[in-house]
Amino acid sequence: MQRTLLRALLISVLLFGGIAALLYLRYAAQSAVPRGLADYHVLIPTGATFDQVVDSLSAKGILRDERAFRLIAEKMEYKRDPMRAGRYKVEPGMNVVKMVRHLRSGEQAPINVVLTNERLPENAAAKVARFIEPDSAELFALFTDPSFLDEIGYTPETFMTIFIPNTYQLYWNTTPRKFVERMIKERDAFWAKEGRKDKARQMGMTPEEVYTLASIVDRETLASSEKPTIAGVYLNRLRIDMPLQADPTSVFATRDFETKRVTEYHTKFDSPYNTYLYKGLPPGPICMASISGIDAVLNAQKHNYIYFCATGEESGLHAFAETYNQHLVNAARYRQKLKERGLR
């Protein structure tokens, strides 16, 4: 009797194992990922459960057969608590086994994080949050945390100098701290190239000071061709101990970023960032400085210009002058040009 029961049990186990093997082989060969989807990237948030991952895959239309996916995921020990977070790319036509193996491997698809000329830490946080998992509040909290800034050797005023506007590949689930560490690494690599650090030292400036001046130059002109000339003007003013009198700094001081015209309200606004009232550079940059702006300061044109104003032409370029009288002539031409164009 006992032998009969053991034989029956063995047969049942073999039969069940055979069925499971057949199902495994069937699902292994079955195409799980349909073709023609708009996006094949899967986002698995930090702390997600297995059911949340399944729901996410189903919502994107990636799973043809949820039951098959669950069976193979269990068999391949993909299911865990919590699931491995990240951004993964699956391929159209990929079968269940390959998809599970890929998700289980942790091989993420990096994402391009694009940094441009954001003005403030909160703007930078909002921009970065468009690309990676942490939200803008979480990023901003770290960007302005005094103890963290002290730890990495920055102040609230100089923090923005860690950003070199460019496109960077990062993993979607990069933490705020890891993001900042990556930016510092990129910043150090940038200043180590092309003798930038040595050039700053020869000018008697720190990289942070160069960056700050570059941010002003960037806000003065969109034309890279004249940035070295404008940088030369400001360096000349610094050399003779003349206030920079840079309109963009007074706008930054007031945070009146939508203004179309700089008035006495801006130039008389009391702030250490207002270079109409305070000599020298402001405490920190007024936006992310571009690479062209930084290099324009490091390779500033040597000339005797002290003044400049817009030409009034559609090109947006500027006229430069060595004396105040020459500057008044250029300013009069600017006003006449605007009048001819019907702009005043």
Image (cartoon, rainbow, N blue to C red):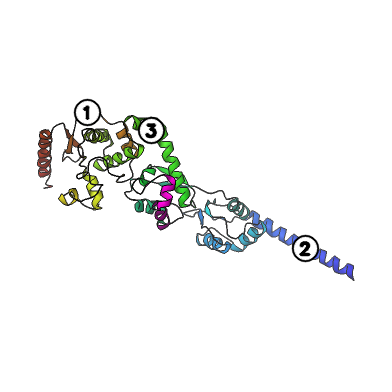
Q: CA distance from mark 1 to mark 2?
A: 90 Å
**Residue at the bottom extreme?**
1
Marks 1 and 2, the one that precedes in the sequence: 2
Q: Which residues are magenta?
A: 137-155
Residue 19 left/right relative to 313: right
Note whether 11 is above or below 131 in the view shown.
Answer: below
Q: CA distance from mark 3 to mark 1?
A: 23 Å
Q: Is label 2 in a helix, a strand or a loop? A: helix
Give the foreground label among 1 and 2.
1
Amino acid type for the residue under numbered disc 1 = His
Give the foreground label among 3 and 2.
3
Camera-nearest residue between 5 and 192: 192
Q: Is residue 151 magenta?
A: yes
The secondary structure that dominates the magenta segment is: helix
Residue receiving disc 3: 197
Residue receiving disc 1: 303
Residue 320 left/right relative to 130: left
Marks 3 and 1, the one that precedes in the sequence: 3
